[in-house]
Every structure is written in C-alpha cells, then in structure tokens.
Image (cartoon, rainbow, N blue to C red):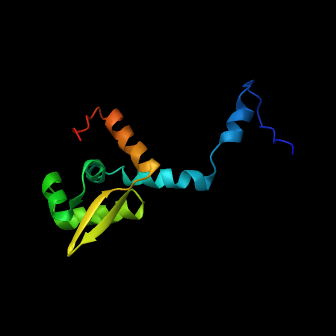
Amino acid sequence: MDKQRLPHDHGHDNEEKIREHMPGEEEIAGVSEALKQLGDPSRLRIFWLLCHCEECVLNIAAIVNMSSPAVSHHLRLLKSSGLIVSRREGKEMYYRTADTELAQELHHMIEKLGRITCPEE
C-alpha cells in the first residue's frame, strides 16, 4: 500500500516512522477524557488523595475542605472516566483510584510535575 505523501516535504526523515506510530482517535480518547477530568483542581486533589488511600465521601470532604455534595459530584465524574472505582460496605461507599495503567501513570505525572512527594506507604 502506498503511503500518502505529505503536501510539503520539509526534509524530515522520520515522518513515516512517526505516522506509523500515530495513535488513532479511539486510542487517545481515554487519555483525553482523563486529562479533561483532572483539569479541575478540586478533582485533581481528590484523585491524588485516592491514589494513596481508600476513603468515604465524608472523609474526603473533610480532607479537601469541601462539602459532601461537591465531593460527590467530582467523584461521579472521576468514576465515569474510569479513574476511580468504588465499593459498598453496608451503607457506606468507599472510593479509590482504579488499578489501571492510565491511573497509575497520571498519579506519577501529577507528583512529578507538581514536585509532590508520596506519603510513606
């Protein structure tokens, strides 16, 4: 199959290799959605917190100094994007970061870019 030639030849000899590795729209959609969700400072703090512990809404609200309804809203968005998961124990819901490569890499990126140190496990 013939590769489509680019409209302008700028003399780069790696364009074909880059084009072969260019992620498709579906491949990049999950990353894009995750980055959108973490674009909000409150959600970013909640996500970071849940990278280090499993917590209920009331405790999360107390830790990040927000109302429970506001925290619940952010948790819904983070959960729908696949960055966190929940489990029920009796009447209480507990939240933690999803055990996915994307969530782990985002956690490391946040700490590296923010120069944030992980608490001791």
Image mark count: 0
- Residue at screen point 68% across, 35% down: 18
**Residue 120 in the image, given as x and y percentages of width and height:** 22, 38
Give the quarter of the image for residue 54. Answer: bottom left
The N terminus - image quarter: top right
Q: Position of residue 14 (x, y in %)?
A: 71, 28
Residue drawn at point x = 26 percent, y = 53 percent: 46
- Estimate the x, y position of residue 23 in percent, counting from the top left: 62, 46
Picture quarter with the C terminus: top left
The residue lying furthest to the bottom in this view is 91
Q: Is residue 5 above or below residue 99?
A: above
Taking the spot 28% from the left edge, 65% from the top edge, the residue there is 73
Which percent across, then down, holds residue 56?
20, 63
**In this view, 10 is above or below 64:** above
Q: Residue at horizontal 81%, vertical 42%? A: 4
- Give the answer, above or below, for where 58 lies relative to 17: below
Q: Give the residue at the far right of this rendering.
A: 1
Instruction: Name the foreground residue: 64 vs 89.
Output: 89
Determine whether, in the image, residue 28 is placed left or right of residue 41.
right
Q: Image height check: is 22 above or below 88? A: above
